[in-house]
Image: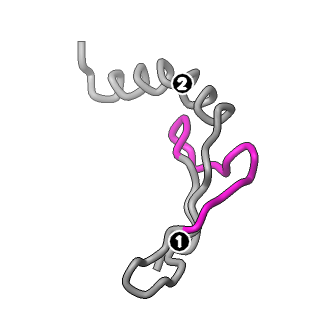
């Protein structure tokens, strides 16, 4: 069972800047099955800024023109 998840930003698993999380509930049992990192504007900005760098790295690894 997954208990906690992080955000994938710049090829790294990181906590949300705010450290906020939210529960994912199994609708059949009401049991909390995971606590998920809650991204906000700061996390989105960080991910967007890292996009060109990640894209370049990936294309160089794949040798795509």
Q: Is residue 52 above or below residue 54?
A: above
Q: Is residue 15 above or below residue 63?
A: below
Q: Quadrant of residue 27?
A: bottom left
Location of residue 34 in the rendering, given as x and y in whole percent from the top left corner: 53, 71
Look at the image and name its color scheme.
Answer: one colour
Q: For residue 39: magenta?
A: no
Q: Residue furthest top?
A: 65
Viewer-closest of 31 and 13: 31
Quadrant of image for the C terminus: top left
Q: Which residue is mark 2?
A: 48
Q: Which residues are magenta?
A: 8-23
Left or right of residue 56: residue 62: left
Mark 1 residue crowding within 10 angstroms, few (<14) / some (14–19) / many (20+): some
Left or right of residue 49: residue 2: left
Q: Residue furthest right?
A: 18
Q: Secondary structure at mark 1?
A: strand
Q: Which residue is mark 1?
A: 34
The mark nearer the N terminus, 2 or 1, is 1
Q: Nearer the viewer, mark 2 or mark 1?
A: 1
Location of residue 53 in the rendering, given as x and y in whole percent from the top left corner: 50, 21
Q: Secondary structure at mark 2?
A: helix
Location of residue 59 in the rendering, given as x and y in whole percent from the top left corner: 33, 23
Q: Is residue 44 above or below residue 16?
A: above
Viewer-closest of 20 and 63: 20
Count of all numbered marks drawn on residues in the image = 2
Q: Is residue 10 above or below residue 37?
A: above
Alpha-carbon span between mark 2 and mark 1: 26 Å
User: Who's the residue at 48% across and 24% down the image?
Assistant: 51
Viewer-closest of 52 and 1: 1
Viewer-closest of 40 and 8: 40
User: Who's the residue at 34% across and 29% down the image?
Assistant: 61
């Amino acid at each position: 069972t997954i208990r906690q998840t992080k955000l994938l930003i710049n090829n790294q698993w990181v906590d949300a800047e705010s450290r906020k999380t939210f529960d994912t509930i199994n609708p059949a049992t009401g049991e909390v099955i995971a606590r998920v990192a809650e991204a906000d504007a700061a996390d989105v900005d960080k991910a967007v800024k890292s996009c060109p760098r990640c894209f370049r790295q990936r294309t160089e690894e794949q040798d795509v023109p």
